[in-house]
Image (spheres, grey):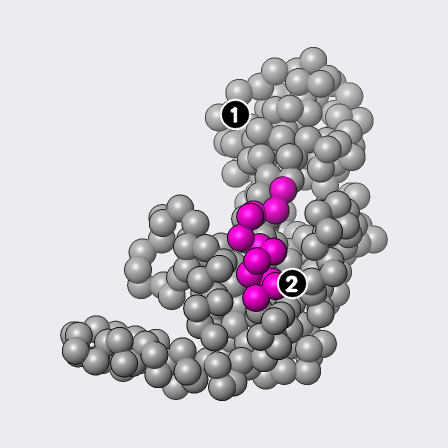
Amino acid sequence: MFAICSYSGFYLITKKNLLYSLAYYRLRIKMVLKAVLFDLGLTLIQTASFPEIYRRILTQFGTKVSIAHILQAQNATAKEYDISKYDESRRKKFWVDYNVSVLKKLNIEKDIVFLATQIDELWWDNSGVRVFPDVEPTFQGLIGKGLKLGLVSNGFKRDLDYVLGELKLEKWFDVIVCIDSCNCAKPDNQIFFYALDKLKIKPSETIFVGDSVPQDYNGALGVGIKPYLLDREGKFPTSYDKIEKLTELLEFF
């Protein structure tokens, strides 16, 4: 027996009827879907890892620290800060304070505020940010089928403006939502409802695609949006509805 997810619940089906049921499920999506919402980082764009970007910037200031040590400091600092409590007016303070905390854990004390500020200002120049190759053909295909596209990110507006402008991604979206839009972050229900309201659609009329289980998958599911986990490296269990590349979305329609 197999379990298959539907908008109205889960059904047990036999192997004999599996292909029929999947076809029926995708037909239902065709009938109601009006938009696709996306996460940004590791869904549409990729960068060097946080520790690697840190290492690159610190090296420019004559400080050498191992990737492992930076990762340890990052993980510890992440538990101390809630980005959803900040908005664009306090973006600078958030990242400087965050960087100061990381640097202290790396036992770096000299000119710490200056260095923390420089890390923020030099971040994107050292990130190697780039678009995944499956993004543009997927967007073109979805728009060609009459679907609206939206972006829901746990980033600050300034960072999104830079990245989307640099990579020429802004033109694709009917709505762009970040933590400044509604003073909240995924998986908070309100950031999803904000995007739906701007698009004037219902949760049942959209799907959400992202790479994070707690933020993207569970967050979308919590408001009644059908989620798909983007699992490019095949690291998540099959209990999640997932895709390995964005172009798989085009097979749904």
- Residue 15 counted in the magenta span: no
Q: Which amino acid is tagged 2?
A: Leu
Q: How many marks?
A: 2
Quadrant location of the N terminus?
A: bottom left
Q: Is residue 62 left or right of residue 77?
A: right
Name, please, the residue furthest toward the top. 62
Residue 37, x across and y down, in percent: 59, 67
The residue at 48%/26% (across/down) is 68
Closer to the camera: disc 2 or disc 1? 2
Looking at the picture, tell me which residue is in the foreground, 138 or 220. 138
Q: Which amino acid is tagged 1?
A: Ile
Note whether residue 185 is visible: no
Pointer 2 or 1: first along the chain? 1
Q: Is residue 141 left or right of residue 86?
A: left
Range shown magenta: 130-141
Q: Residues within 10 Å of mark 1 (few under 14, many from 20)?
A: some
* Location of residue 184 with respect to 108 vertically, above or below: below
Q: Which mark is residue 151?
A: 2
The residue at 71%/18% (across/down) is 60
Note whether residue 240 is visible: yes
Q: Secondary structure at mark 1?
A: helix
- Residue 137 counted in the magenta span: yes
Circle 1 residue: 67
Residue 165, x across and y down, in percent: 77, 50
Residue 46, x across and y down, in percent: 58, 43
